[in-house]
Amino acid sequence: MQMNKGLFVVIVLAIIWIISFSITNIIGANYSSENKIVIVPINGVIVPMQGDYSLFGEEKTVSSDFVKRLDGLEGDNSVKAIIFEINSPGGTVVASKEISDRVKKLKKPNIALIREYGASGAYWIASASDYIIADELSVTGSIGVIGSYLEFSDLFKKYGIGYERLVAGDYKDAGSNYRKLTKNEKNLLQKKLDIIHNRFKQDVAMNRNISADAIDGIANGIFYIGSEAYDLGLVDQLGSKDDAISKAKEMAGIKDAKIIESKEKKSIVDVLSKLSNTAFYYAGKGIGSTFVKNGFNIQA
Amino acid sequence: MKKIKSDFELLMPRRAGFWRRAAAFIIDLIIIYAVTSPLTGLLAKGIGLQDEFSISTFKEIFSRQELFYGAETMVILVAAVMALAGLFYWSILEYSLKQSIGKMIMKIAVKSQLKELSIWQVIARNITKALAVTSLSIIFLIDLLYLLFNKNRQRLSEVLSKTEVCNADE
């Protein structure tokens, strides 16, 4: 009787295995050979962390998540090419550079498609891709660094609010909202912006094969309309998403591919948890630190 | 002072405890994953993983959800077949032997609160478990929570199917 019980169990398991093996062959035959071109969006401000997520706020591209996503696509054999669909005014220096560095290391053919705008840090990322396509009326370029901020000292003076300066280290509060910069401090902060700007320029010049002299003339912070950017060599082609897909197929050497619009899936649990995180974050942050946030903040 | 068991308690097998049942469920899950390994391998390949299915595959799947847009039909198909395989495994074994492999090892068995255990009773009691094979569904969690707060140690689907799980070694 015990033997029969064992035999029965083995038969049941064998039936399940045979069914799953057969279904695998049927589904797998249709699926495994499919080539994919993945369109990855770069929307809104480029930031390094998820912390500033806002349910009703503007869209953001988080560099750490983005790099992870590219790692995944790089390891996926069925993905033959990647298109970055850019609608971003730029973002923080480090976040933009992180994504740009990762894009540069991609081994798969990749194309930057600048649609509405791909300026500053977003252009830094685009320049790292293999090929840039921009709409002729898009806004791009803006190769510069900004560190401007609001300074309230005169307003505070008007209302009798004083700033008691207590620092160890002369420059510790350079860039504070509550007092004007000294000439020395202004020079110092300007030098730092120049260091970042030079790095930005060098990277773009190297990525786009533009000479050092030429980049100095282009990278003065001004933005360019797509057609102007094409004339200056900042983009390779003027065109649309369809052009980008055709070019991606050509670069990957494939005729047909499934086009996947990659987007981050958000469940209701994600949204609620992020919403509560944001609420707690701002509750803890307080009014004082909100002022500090308006201080010296470098963006590309 | 040692409590003397009543005739009723001596005659009726005790309902199986939570941890014993949980261990049996985990053993069964491992067996189901093993026998459906061709499917899980396909799932891994379908979302573009270079290696075959491994313990980290599910983590990979959830960290690369964007690829579901290309593979969602296949993922849904595979998930459905795996859930059906789980339902078949539990239902056939429990109907025929009153025990799955996990239950045999943990020495527990399914009993009907009616006269005989019917195939419809075992299917009804195993639907939520089958859904849990591919994802931790909310229905299974409700089913499980009911067991934790129910003095008869029955899942909601067991109450509805008029079945219970008892110790087989008494």
Image (tube, rainbow, N blue to C red):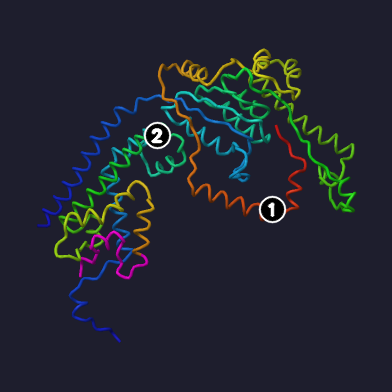
Would you call the spot at circle 2 few (<14 residues within 10 Å), some (14-19), or many (20 or more)?
A: many
> Dividing the image into 4 quarters, which one contains the C terminus of chain B?
bottom left
- For residue B83, above or below residue B46: below
Which quadrant is home to the N terminus of chain B? bottom left
Q: Amino acid at mark 1?
A: Lys
Q: Chain of mark 1?
A: A
Position in image of residue A140 (x %, y %) = 66, 23
The residue positioned farthest toward the top in the image shown: A231
Q: A192 left or right of A268? A: right
Q: Amino acid at mark 2?
A: Ile
Where disc 2 sits, the SS reads loop
Residue with the mark numbered 1:
A285
Residue beneath disc 2: B47
User: Where does residue B155 sit, x and y in percent of width and height?
Assistant: 31, 61
Q: Residue at x 49, y 24 (%)?
A: A108
* Residue A205 place in picture, x, y as percent: 68, 20
Q: Quadrant of residue A96?
A: top right
In the image, which residues are magenta?
Answer: B148-170
The residue shown at (62%, 27%) is A125
Asked which quadrant contains residue A207, the reply is top right
Q: Are marks 2 and 1 on the same chain?
A: no
| The one of A288 and B105 positioned closer to us in this rendering | A288
Q: State the separation of the CA atoms marked 2 and 1.
A: 41 Å
Residue positioned 31% across, 53% down in the render: B128
Q: Element type at marker 1?
A: helix
Q: Residue at x 55, y 35 (%)?
A: A67
Q: Is residue B84 left or right of residue A100?
A: left
* Closer to us: B10 or A157: A157
| Image depth: mark 2 or mark 1 in front | 1
- Residue A39 image position (x, y, % from top left): 50, 27
Does the magenta run of residues contain B80? no
Q: Chain of mark 2?
A: B
